[in-house]
Image: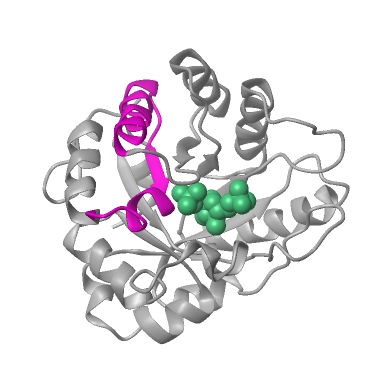
Amino acid sequence: MIDLSSISTNSKALYLAYDQGLEHGPTDFNDENVNPSYILDIAVKGRYNGIILQKGVAEKYYTGSEVVHAVPLVLKLNGKTSLVSGEPFSPLICTVSEAIGLGAQAVGYTVYVGSGRQDEMFEVFGGIVREAHEKSIPVIGWMYPRGGTVKEETPGITSYAARIGLELGADIVKVKYHDSLSALKEIVAAAGRTRVVFSGGPKVGQDEFLAMVRAVADSGALGIAVGRNVWQSKDPPGLTKEIQHLLGLDLFGTTQENER
Ligand code: FBP
């Protein structure tokens, strides 16, 4: 279960992201992982702490299925394609109420911090946080620095993005991973009591990916929201077990640790 109390502790979490069909298109997929049922099966067998889906996939594959009882849904409320240009902006596709109706236990929203359209996204995000908190569900902010004066996402910029998530009321921020434990710790510190999950990024070799997970585990972050590195791998169940082991998650995908 994803709730506000479970993420305000030192617990760890592993989320499976599957919104790339909208963000990147089928170019990320092969014959197996193009099928949402294949991904839901990975999430169920791997006892993931959440599956991140867009509204349409949730409606057709999650809601009303057995998966509802096994893996919490994180409904991504906005999204965009890779076919647009200009200042990054991700429009709202689904409301908080609709997400809850689909069975969501948490909602996600991308804010392109630094974009020329940042103001619009701040305003929408503010409304989402208000409504989600009235309804007692957590909000995950995909805090992605893009557009405007952002030329390169340095660790300092990611720390700023994570901090913006705290300032705007996000319960969790999902931010870019950097290959430096001290940088990861700084990002986690900047987010304060807003918990941090790092994104997996494009597929890399398994050893390299597990080194990333180890650093995330040591950084004080909540965990990782991974997509391609798991469902593009040859053995998603085996890799999931290794990730959970490194994060200190037990067989039920939970940790019991003290409040921070
Ligand atoms: P991956 O682990 O596959 O990178 O997924 C994480 C994620 O944030 C997805 O939720 C989202 O679709 C994608 O990355 C966005 O990637 P980008 O904006 O960098 O193309």
Read off the magenta span. Answer: 206-235
Relative height, residue 161 to residue 73 (above, below): above
Instruction: Give the total of numbered labels.
Output: 0
> Predominant secondary structure in magenta?
helix
Q: Is residue 131 magenta?
A: no
Residue at x-position 81% and y-position 43%: 147
User: Could you tell me if residue 168 is visible in this image?
Assistant: yes
Instruction: Say whether residue 171 is left or right of residue 206.
Output: right
| Quarter location, residue 167 | top right
Q: Is residue 213 magenta?
A: yes
Instruction: Say whether residue 218 is left or right of residue 84.
Output: left
Q: Nearer the viewer, residue 196 or 86?
A: 86
Q: Position of residue 109 (x, y in %)?
A: 61, 57
Residue at x-position 41% and y-position 68%: 30
Residue sitting at the far left: 251
Instruction: Say whether residue 123 is left or right of residue 210.
Output: right
Q: Position of residue 20 (x, y in %)?
A: 53, 62
Residue at x-position 42% and y-position 73%: 34
Q: Position of residue 208 (x, y in %)?
A: 36, 31
